[in-house]
Structure formats: C-alpha cells, structure tokens
Amino acid sequence: MLLGTNMPAALPGCAGLDARRAPQLMTSPRRCPCRAQPRRPQCAVTQEVAGTTQVRRNENIGKLQAGYLFPEIAKRRRLHQEQNPDAKIISLGIGDTTQPIPPSITRAMRDAAEGMGTIEGYSGYGAEQGRPELRESICSRYYAMHGLQAEEVFVSDGSKCDIGRLQVLFGQQMSVAVQDPSYPVYVDSSVIMGMTDGFNGSGYDNIQYMVCRPETDFFPDLSKVKRTDIIFFCSPNNPTGAAATREQLTELVQFARKNGSIIVYDAAYSAYISDERPRTIFEIPGAQECAIETGSFSKYAGFTGVRLGWTVVPKALKYADGATVHADFNRISTTIFNGASVIAQAGGLACLQPEGYREMGQLVDYYKENATILRQTFKEMGFTVHGGENAPYVWVGFPGRESWDVFSEILTQCNIVTTPGSGFGPAGEGFVRASAFGQRDDVLEAVERLKAKYGK
Amino acid sequence: MLLGTNMPAALPGCAGLDARRAPQLMTSPRRCPCRAQPRRPQCAVTQEVAGTTQVRRNENIGKLQAGYLFPEIAKRRRLHQEQNPDAKIISLGIGDTTQPIPPSITRAMRDAAEGMGTIEGYSGYGAEQGRPELRESICSRYYAMHGLQAEEVFVSDGSKCDIGRLQVLFGQQMSVAVQDPSYPVYVDSSVIMGMTDGFNGSGYDNIQYMVCRPETDFFPDLSKVKRTDIIFFCSPNNPTGAAATREQLTELVQFARKNGSIIVYDAAYSAYISDERPRTIFEIPGAQECAIETGSFSKYAGFTGVRLGWTVVPKALKYADGATVHADFNRISTTIFNGASVIAQAGGLACLQPEGYREMGQLVDYYKENATILRQTFKEMGFTVHGGENAPYVWVGFPGRESWDVFSEILTQCNIVTTPGSGFGPAGEGFVRASAFGQRDDVLEAVERLKAKYGK
C-alpha cells in the first residue's frame, strides 16, 4: 500500500537507499569484504512487497534458526497441554526457580516498595551501574579477596541482558568461541550482532564451537580451538552441569592470554559448587587481564522474576590499543541501560547481609538436593549421567537418539518437560537436560514417572 | 605484560586476527564500501601496548564524544559541591522524578514483593514480553482505540533500554535521522551501533540532524531532510518541550511512508499534553505501517527508579521484503532481555486501574504546575521561553551565548543545575533546559534565586 499510494510507480526497489550505500551494490554478489553486508541482491524489484517500508531487514536476525530455545519449548508444552487438558505437566525444563524468596530478602524489597511512597524512601534514577553499597557488597562477598574493587562491578537486571550489552560493547567485528553445548544466548546474540555467518545445518559458520563432551571431562581440547577475540565460557556449565577445575580454568586463562583473547565467564551457578573448584574466574592468576565475569541473583535467591545480576569488568582488562574495556562498558551501561530496579537492588543488598546470605545458602541447598535426587534416579535406571553435583542441571545421555525425540517422548509419555541437548549446540545431540529447579514434590513425582517409563 | 611474557617477541600486531579477516587489510585505508570497518590501520605494530589483549576496541564506541550527557553534568555538579560544601544545590537538570509514588501503586508493589516470599505469590521468569494482563492494560488504556492489540505491546524496563534493543534490532546497516536537539540516547546508541561516521565538531557524519528551532515551531523542515531508514522522533519533545500538532505528525507520517522509513516515536511525556494534540503516533492514519512507539511509566508514576516502560511494534509494520518487524523485535526481546521485574510490573498494572490512573494524573499535574511556575518566571524575567505547556521541560533561550557557559553560570551563581542545550545536539546551542521534576519548595526557591540573578 505504501508503495502503491505514495511512491512514484516507476521507482526502483533501491531508490530509497541513500547515496553512500551505492558502492555496496557494485561489490561481489556474494559478500563485501567485511561481514556487514547481506548476501542477497539488494535492488531486485521483485523483493518489494506492497504495504511495506523500504527498510531492509537486519539480515543477521534472518540468520537465526527457529525461535529462541525456551520459547520454543514453551510452545510445545502448551500444545501438549491443549491436546491433553488433564495432564499434570511437570517442568524440569527451563531453569526457572520455584521456591519463595527467603524472608529477610522479601522484607527488604517490601520495605523498599513501601518506601517509594514516602519522601524519605523515594528514589528516582540511581546510578546506571548500581547503588554504590550494592556494588561494594557484591565485591566484598565475591571479588575483593581476588584484588577487585567495587567500581569494577556493574549491577544489572540480569546476566542474559548483560550478555546483550557485552555484545553491543564488542560490536560486529569480533570473532567468537563458545562451549558446545552452551547457553543459547551466547550464540544467538553473536548471530544478531553479525559476528557470525549463516547457519550450516548444525551450527553457524565463523563461530568456534569448542566441543565439550564426556570424553574430555566437558572441557574443550584447546589445542584444536582457533584464536578468537571473545571466548564465552560458562562454569558451572549450563547445560552439562560440569564445573571446571582449577587446572582447567588455569589452562583456559593461559590460552586466552597467549592469544590475547577476552573470556566472558558466566558464573551464574557458582553458588552450586560443592567442592574446591573456583567460584570465580578471578581466582585464577592473570584472569583480570583477560576476563569479564557475569553473575546473578536469579539462581541464588530465586530472583528470576525480580531481575538482578552483575558484570565484573576489571580495569586491568585492555584492548590492543591500551584502552580499558571498563571505560567502554561503563559508556554502554550509561547509554543503553538505566540501572536495575531500586526495589530489586534493595533485595540484592539483603541477600548479601549475614541473614540473607544464610537464607540464600539454604535455598541453593534445596535445589542441590533436587539435583541429587534426579542424578541418582537416572543413574539407578542405568543412564550415563553428568552434572548435578556442582550445578543445578543433570545431563543425561541417550546415545544414538535425537534429543528432540527424547524430549517429545518424555513430554508425551511422562508429562515432563526437559530440555533437548541439541538445543544447546551440535555437541548436545543425544543428551537431555533435567533442571533441578522445582518443588520437591514435583521432582519426586517426576522421578516416579520416569522410573515407570525408563526403570528396569 | 601479556605480549611480553606469553607471545613470541616477533609476532606482528595483527597475527591474532584470523584468516577470514585478512581481506579487509587490503581494502582502501579509508574505508570499506560498507561502514563496518575502522579507518585506522589495523596492523601497525606501534598500536600494541604491553599488558593488553589483542582484541581491537569497537571503534564505534571510540567515535563517541566525552561522556553521556547526564553523567557529565553529575560530575560537574559534584565538583561544584566539593568546592562549595555549604551550597544547597537545587536540580532542574536531569529529568528525574522526586515525588513519592502514589499509594495504590506503591501498595501493589509492596504486596507483590511480599508475595514473592510465599508459594502462591512467587513468580519466576515471566514472559520476556511482559505479563499478558499488563500488555492488555497498556493496550486498552492507550492503543486499542487506534486499532492495536495487546500482543503488539512489549513491556520493558524502560524506554532508554528499549532504544538500545531497537538499535540492536535495526543493526549497523541502517541510516538514521534525529531531531536536533534531541535526547542524546538516539544519537549515542546510533554511534555505538556503527550507523554513523565520526564526530565532525558539532555532530556525527552520516546522521541526519533535523533542525528543530523556534522559527519552525520546533518541527523539522522535512523538505530539507534526506531519506533515512529510521527517524527518531520524540513528542512532547525532550528537551524543547514542544509537542507536535496533529498536522505536524500527519506530515511526519506521510514523509515516512513516502520514503518507506520507520519512525521510532518516543512518547514518554505524552501524559503531559494539555490540549488536543495527539497522545500517540497511532492517532495518525497510516502510522501502523511506518511507526514504532516507546512509552514509559517513569514520568507518569515516578517509576524512574522502579524501571518500567513499553514498546509498541505494530504487526502491520514491515521490512522491504515483507517480513514483520514485530517478529524480529520479539526475537530480540526474548534473546537479550528477560522481562521487567515482576514487582515493577505489579506496579504498572496498578497504574492502569481506575484508582492508580487517577493518582498518576495528579502526579503529572504536580509536575506540570512546576513547569508553569518555571515558564512564568523565565518569561517575567524577559527570556524567550518555549515548552512547559505540554511537557515537563522548559526551554530557555540565551541568544548569542554558549549553553555550557550559561549552565556553569547558573550552577556557580545560583547553585542550580540545569542542562545545557548543546548537550542535546548542535541546534540546542544557546538554550538551557529547565526540568520541572522537583519538589515544589525547591522549584520555588530556584525561582527566587533565578530572579535574584536574572530578574530586572
């Protein structure tokens, strides 16, 4: 309609592109030397569709396959529920907390909310980087002993959002490596930013998939990994539940330093570590010069709905030209972010007080016990089971089978939602992830259903 | 140190770049046909700095001038306070709400926070796009009468963050126009995404500054504006306080449709409109095919610290190839965002109930009265004053003077923080913005101080 009514009829499809774009049209039809440009011809009149704008779709988004994993699972779950209205579906799928937030933390948020109705308790915009006392508390609980300072901690509305902001920080020019399997957001956000090429059937071209399978203790064989600018690394790992050892993380840090790479270390599940493995990448000497770390209250205090996390960007971390990454991340944080909710921040502060910290530990223990139950169950049924000891995820092998088939089987026959391993990357094929986030009764019932189907 | 200890001494500076980047190095030193590539030589060994990674800084961020405006103002204010510890500084600077959140809204957030401590009231991850009932409420209050539906409304943690996500949606290839002066985030985020070239002394190259000055009633002369993919347009405007008329918005929509452009319409101050001017771009016929709108509870209900806003992406809005923008924005929202805090969302729901809506109106009236006081004061002192009638901002002309000088004068001599007009773009030079967000007593005292300095 737009073109029909407002545009001169003879206008060619690309007339709206301004002059400085013109040279693109004369470059190779396959691609321009940088990865910014779409492959498809841009001026074909046939591309015009009535009633559209003349704005070209961001082709990077077009490269993405299907939906983001979890909405896709939610869709399949809904469908199953619609077809089976009486089914009592239990979710061991998305890692979503289910237990109430402990009292001292809830109280702090309630008081903060109530205070917003008073002159004394009211708070408008805070610093985009977070309340100074919260940055201080996070730092002194988790990072000060490793030489970091409060102003290297940026409070945020959660790790997923921080990954997005980090990608904006890095920009399109970066090359990226991810663990395979891994949390889909690293890959998907890299695709969106244009750091990768298209989908090749199992993964995206121009992204390094660092295979993490049982054979190598879920740590990549770094001798086979090409240098990239950015290395996303999650430990304890989502989805495999593997927590890297000190030796492994030392190897990773040395690899990054040797290559001059930046590690983005996702430590969202650190509190689930039971033994002496490092809780933060900054336990490893030299990490401050090569790593950023994201952390979150989501899985510690049940804050998935409250939205509160943080990112640590050491001032010692520098780009090749000597500029600090910290200064640029600060600029990103102040420009396209406006701080986490002050009510959530009040909750975060309470989490780190002695009482809240104790309560948070109990909450983590609850989910860890769920993980133990799931782990034991699958083991007893004869499956090869990984994770679940230092992480809230249990990674179950179904060798020779496709993950989505197993997912469907468990959904339709047990009314249990899991997550198909292949949704986390090609090397996740043949596995299914069971999440320990759930109410105990549900976990126990799920276990019974699983035993009925898969038990010997 | 990295290079000194871990890298072979003779390694050239670009050895870390992987092979697929190599062709770039052979292209013109000025720029590759697309705007993705940096201008400076990439392999100069002299660029290496000891103790750095080998990751090249995102050059787009390097193009940004100084800090984001408001942190810069905060810095100058701090400095003045340090030098004058006894000064009682009043802020008419950043548009930050000061008045308590009304009771029914505070109560809803308090109850939601408290509920998070119970099994029944607990809520984990919600839909990234927001609670369905909140999307429904926003839609029925503001958009349903213009033919929009709840699922075209995406709830968020605020407009600033939504602008960031919209920029990620658009990607680097887009060309951009902004009102001049305008809210700095449109320009800065465009620079960060690589949509512009470098700073040229007053603005950035390859961005259309649509001059909005008193001579044209603060509406751009569109006959002088080149076609761009994206047009950021804020009305009521921050900083000029001008609210576009129906005729002006009709002209804007026709301009966008003729060019096949997408308008990003920032309606964060809509509730401040006193007369019959449109509250939303979707009052204009045809806007659904060419516009996105952002909205916010920040200035309606004092939610600057709570963090809650929304973005409307009509399903009728399409890229040149016919793909809907809605689907892609949905993908962005689910991939790099995780929903607004459920506590904030409970507050937003309360805002749209009859009681909360009435209370919100009273709050807006309070700030509007501040605006009237400021407007009258400057007028009485003989200044040319704009805005303040349909917006919480008063735009005061100081012809022939530099904005930052006036800012400094008012800060040092009246202990009042304003915002220098030039911080909003080249056409803001010679103006200062006074914000009506403040407590009445402070506004009245500010007025006295201003009269003492500038009164006749």
Image (tube, coloured by chain):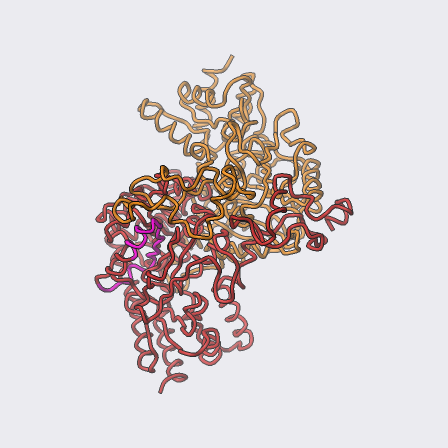
Chain colours: A orange, B red
Q: Residue at x 51, y 12 (%)?
A: A456
Q: Position of residue A242 (x, y in %)?
A: 60, 31
Q: Position of residue A287 (x, y in %)?
A: 67, 46
Q: Residue at x 46, y 35 (%)?
A: A64
Residue at the limit of the structure toward the top, as seen here = A456
Which corner quadrant of the image does residue B427 belong to?
bottom left
Relative to A184, is B251 on the left or the right? Answer: left
Residue at the limit of the structure toward the front, as seen here = A10
Relative to A328, is B205 on the left or the right? Answer: left
Q: Position of residue A308 (x, y in %)?
A: 48, 48
Range drawn in magenta: B252-275
Specify whether residue B202 is in view. yes
Judge whether residue B261 is colored magenta.
yes
Residue at the limit of the structure toward the bottom, as seen here = B456
Q: Nearer the viewer, residue A449 or B270?
A: B270
Q: Please give the count of numbered marks on the rendered protein.
A: 0
Q: Position of residue A44 (x, y in %)?
A: 39, 39
- Residue A383 sits above or below residue A300 on the image: above
Q: Nearer the viewer, residue B271 or B307?
A: B271
Q: Nearer the viewer, residue B239 or B96?
A: B239
Judge whether residue A425 is colored magenta.
no
Quarter of the image where the C terminus of chain B is located:
bottom left
Q: Residue at x 66, y 48 (%)?
A: B54
- Residue B57 sits above or below residue A382 on the image: below
Specify whether residue B138 is in view. no
